[in-house]
Amino acid sequence: MSPRTILIIVNVVAIAAVLGFIAYRVVSLRRNPEEHNPDNLTPFFDDDVLEGAHLERVLGVALIALVVAVIGLLAYFIWEPFREASAKDGFHSQSVERGAILFANDQSKEYDSTKSLLCANCHGVDGGGGAATFVVKSDDPRCDPNQTVDANLAAKQPYCLPKQVSWAAPSLQLAGLRYNRAQLTQVITYGRPGTPMPAWGVASGKGALQQQSIQDLVNYVESLITTSDKAQKAAADELQKCARAACVGRENLTDPAVQAAAVKWVTDSRAELAAAQAEAAAASVKDTATYDKLIQQKQEQVGVAESWQRTTQSASDGQLLFMNNCARCHTRGWSYFDPTNPQTNPTPGPMGGGAFGPNLTQGDVNNQFPPPTGESELFAWISIGVEANQGYGVRGISSGRMPHFGAVLTKDQIESIMAYERSL
């Protein structure tokens, strides 16, 4: 039986005893009304009694009461820190339980149809990662952004149709290692614009969760955290073979189906570029800007396809680690890229070319962290990050959204990523 339960029982018994005594006295007065003189007319003890045994008894009772009070205060000061810690743990446990209900879907034992937000549909029942359905609009310059999606559009401009993709949802077992509480709160409250992650907080103007519910979810996510050793071992194992989405290992790249798909992607991309150039040559002058942009897109697609083909043939540890840990934020479309069929979804951007995170290509990393003096600062930026609004590198100001990988990757793995980023 917990101290909290014992305290509740003692209080209930004490209150019941007081109420019972009051009830007894009221009933007794009604049954046996007795007249008595006022207290100021009632004779009291004489001086011999007051200064003798009666006084000794009163002083004895006072001494006992003093001893009880002193022992009680001493016991309180000894027990209170433990009670406070136990209460804090109890409040946290209850918060985690509420967070589990909010996170759950109908496959979870904590599921409540009136409260659960179905986060597990995307992140997995155990929080180990999964996928979310998402619609990506066409960015083809020939398309009208306000056009109606119907059968007529599908017949005349199929390249203008939006595509439904399977967006890789990250593992929340690593979230507590990569983000602090403030970052987790920010992500859950405001979501990730341009991704399937919605804004859940009232503060965002879009969600319905107040601050306590957000903290319940944060506490639940932190309860899922794995150990640093397991995370680093998993990152090393994924260099050889990776089973989750938006992740590749050497065995994945050497798969004949992946390499054949890469060759086909290059061939088809070059054909699309040639077709766009021919179409541009026959277009009117007023469409020149549109076709210039289209050709630029097709050239980028060819470059991305050729780069991916080279990756399937030879990839450094740093490149694989970057793709598995950094590309989700720093490469447009990587979260729904399918290595076995790279043409099934919209073409991703150049590796490291920027998306939710900044562009790392064209020497930007070298400019932000000039070698060799910037080497230690770049390592710190990746491993432990920088708080929001604090400076980093050359005139950089942190947004506070950059995750930290020091507990997820080893020192050698982070240095491999650094070398790859500098090569971009």
Image: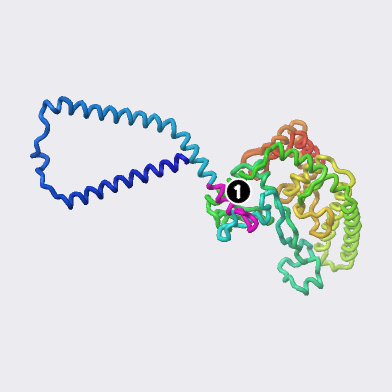
Residue 276: say if magenta: no
- Picture quadrant where residue 164 is located: bottom right
Q: Between residue 248 and residue 234, name the one nearer to us.
A: 234
- Picture quadrant where residue 380 is located: top right
Mark 1: secondary structure:
helix
Q: Position of residue 140 (x, y in %)?
A: 79, 62
- What's drawn in magenta, residue-wise? 94-109
Residue at image position (75%, 72%) is 150
**Relative to 67, residue 108 above or below:** below
Q: Residues within 10 Å of mark 1 (few under 14, many from 20)?
A: some
- Judging from the image, the colouring scheme is rainbow
Q: Position of residue 250 (x, y in %)?
A: 85, 44
- Picture quadrant where residue 295 is located: bottom right
Residue farthest to the bottom? Answer: 152
In this view of the protein, can residue 368 be seen by the observer? yes
Residue at image position (79%, 59%) is 346
Would residue 281 be found to the left or right of residue 392 on screen? right
Q: Report the number of discs.
A: 1
Q: Between residue 170 and residue 397, name the one nearer to us.
A: 170
Q: Position of residue 191 (x, y in %)?
A: 63, 53
Residue farthest to the front? Answer: 31
Name the chief secondary structure element in magenta. Answer: helix
Amino acid tagged 1:
Gln
Looking at the rendering, in which quadrant would you find the C terminus?
A: top right
Would residue 217 be found to the left or right of residue 370 on screen? left
Q: Between residue 323 and residue 369, name the one nearer to us.
A: 323
Residue at image position (88%, 66%) is 279
The residue to which callout 1 is attached is: 186
Q: Position of residue 413 (x, y in %)?
A: 77, 37
In this view of the protein, can residue 424 be seen by the observer? no
